[in-house]
Amino acid sequence: MSDVQKRLEALEVKAVFAEDLLEQLNLTIYRQRQDIERLQLQMAQLRQQLQDSGGPAAQRDLRSEIPPHY
C-alpha cells in the first residue's frame, strides 16, 4: 500500500469518527433543549400556582404554628 493510500485511509477513518461524534453531539443538544423547554414549562406552572395561592405568605404563618414537641 502506498503512502498516499495510507494517508487517505487515515483521513477517511478520522472523517467517519468526526461524523459520528457530530451526530452524538447534535443528539445531546437536542435532548438538552427538550429538557430545558420542559423545565421552563414547569417553572411557569409553579409560578402560576404560587400566584393563584396568594403568594408564599398566604400558605402558612410560622409564628402562629406550635412546634410539635409542645
Image (cartoon, rainbow, N blue to C red):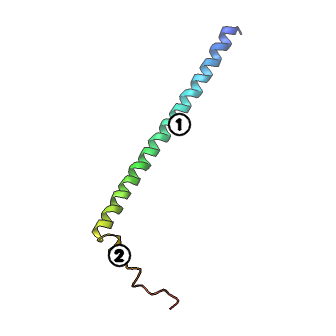
The residue that mark 1 highlights is 24
In the shown orientation, is residue 41 left or right of residue 28? left
Q: Name the residue type under label 1.
A: Gln
Residue plotted at (34% across, 73% down): 57
Q: Quadrant of residue 10?
A: top right
The correct choice, above or below, for 14 with respect to 42 in the image is: above
> How many neighbours does mark 1 have within 10 angstroms: few (below 14), some (14-19), or many (20 or more)?
few
Q: Residue furthest right?
A: 1
Query: Which sits in the foreground, 47 or 70?
Result: 70
Residue 6: percent from left, percent from top: 68, 13
Query: Which sits in the foreground, 58 or 53?
Result: 58
Tag 2's secondary structure?
helix
Tag 1's secondary structure?
helix
Query: Which sits in the foreground, 11 or 64?
Result: 64
Q: Residue furthest bottom?
A: 70
The correct choice, above or below, for 34 with respect to 9 in the image is: below
Which quarter of the figure is the N terminus placed in?
top right
In the shown orientation, is residue 47 left or right of residue 28? left
Residue plotted at (46% across, 45% down): 32
| Callout in the foreground (1, 2) | 2
The residue that mark 2 highlights is 59
**1 or 2: tag closer to the N-terminus:** 1
Residue plotted at (37% across, 78% down): 60
> How many neighbours does mark 2 have within 10 angstroms: few (below 14), some (14-19), or many (20 or more)?
few
Residue 21: percent from left, percent from top: 56, 32
Q: Name the residue type under label 2.
A: Gln
Residue 3: percent from left, percent from top: 70, 9
The correct choice, above or below, for 26 with respect to 39 in the image is: above
Residue 25: percent from left, percent from top: 51, 36
